Amino acid sequence: MNRHIVALGISSVLALAATASNAALDDAKGQALLKKGTCSGCHNMDNKIVGPSFKDVAAKHKGEAGAVAKIEKVIRNGSKGAYGPIAMPGTPKSKLSDAEAHDLAQWLLSK
Ligand code: HEC
């Protein structure tokens, strides 16, 4: 069999597997979690408000190993000193579960 066709077959199986186990949120679900977590008073996608824009956050962490886990921790525990003098408060589990924080971190970093 033609090697090229075999390679294509394998990569589409891998792509499907990646989609199934690692599905990013769609934008409506991502925005709903931002609202649920009350992030929107301090952040939006394109402009700095109190905190950095999520576009800037995604650009800062582009290609960084472990970035999703790092941002999950920021969501849970807050952050200080990474962008400026204002600290971000943590987010209790009553607002966002661990799974929601994970999905949200993954979605934000995809922006
Ligand atoms: C009271 C305002 C406020 C709220 C509410 C808030 N943030 Fe932040 N956020 C900030 C500030 C200020 C920073 C910058 C902190 C720093 O300099 O370390 C920040 C930083 C971040 C970062 C960048 C972290 C990094 O290391 O690159 C992310 C991602 C983030 N916030 C996500 C969220 C999400 C998601 C929520 C909602 C669950 C949220 N924030 C709620 C103010 C806020």
Image (tube, grey):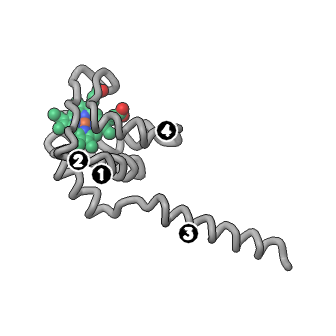
- Image quarter of the N terminus: bottom right
> Foreground residue, 18 or 63?
18
Which residue is labeled 4 in the image?
66
Give the distance between the C-alpha atoms of the residues marked 4 and 3, in whole angstroms. Answer: 22 Å
Q: Residue at x 36, y 48 (%)?
A: 102
- Residue type at numbered disc 4: Gly
Image quarter for residue 88?
top left
Mark 3 vs 1: CB contact within 8 A: no
Dot 2 or dot 3: first in sequence order is 3
The outermost residue toward the bottom is 1
Residue 51 visible to an observer of this rendering = no
> Foreground residue, 70 or 109?
70
Which residue is labeled 1 in the image?
100
Q: Residue 17 placed where, x, y %?
A: 56, 65
Q: Which mark is residue 16?
A: 3
Give the distance between the C-alpha atoms of the residues marked 4 and 2, in whole angstroms. Answer: 20 Å
Residue 78 visible to an observer of this rendering = yes
